[in-house]
Amino acid sequence: MDSAEFHAAVYDTVRLIPAQKVTSYGHIAKLIGMPNHSRHVGQALKFLTSGTTPPVPWHRVVSSSGAISSRGPGTDGARRQGEALEAEGVEVTVTGAGERKVDFSVCGWFPAPGTV
DNA sequence: GCCTTGACATGCG
DNA sequence: ACGCATGCCAAGG
């Protein structure tokens, strides 16, 4: 698979995420046929914020633990993501430190690879 | 062409 | 349950 194809696959998979559902980088990687490329999934996602048409629900993608990645303390990206998820009705668990996490047992979206 | 970086995952202590 | 260490692979310098 080419790098461009990889990006396209990530975009397409993220777009397939239904509303009020969240998935993890690892699962995205599995869905596109690359279980070990979890990191590059996010790497592609950061590109989505640059103005993608149609808009991709990248905020529905979190780490395997259900925690939202930092992406830089200076940026409010993580906070925005948490807010966006809450706005969609996703159960966001806010820890004492203000870190937002999602409950996979409630809003987890994990389709089997190949059925997508 | 080599080295560093990275929105991660998994295993072990 | 939490923190640290290792593995993975591609993109950018």
Image (spheres, coloured by chain):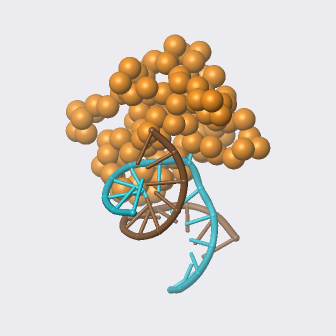
Chain colours: A orange, B cyan, C brown
In this rendering, the count of numbered labels is: 0
Q: Is C4 positioned to the left or the right of B5 in the image?
A: left
Q: Position of residue A36 (x, y in %)?
A: 36, 56
Locate residue A57 relative to residue A32 in the image: left or right: right
Residue for point 32% across, 31% down: A110
Q: Residue A41, position in %: x, y? A: 47, 47
The residue sitting at the right extreme is: A74
Q: Report if residue A81 is visible in the image.
A: no
Nearest the camera: A11 or A77? Answer: A77
Image quarter hosting the C terminus of chain A: top left
Q: Looking at this view, is A20 or B12 the one in front?
A: B12
Q: On screen, A59 above or below A47?
A: above
Q: Is residue A41 visible?
A: yes
| Quarter of the image where one finds residue A64 | top left
Residue under the image location 48 percent in, 27 percent down: A102
Determine whether A79 is above or below A1 in the image: above
> On screen, A49 above or below A35?
above
- Viewer-nearest residue: A2 or A85: A85
Whole-percent x and y of residue A16?
A: 40, 28
Q: Position of residue A25 (x, y in %)?
A: 43, 43
Residue drawn at (63%, 30%), measured in percent from left and top? A96
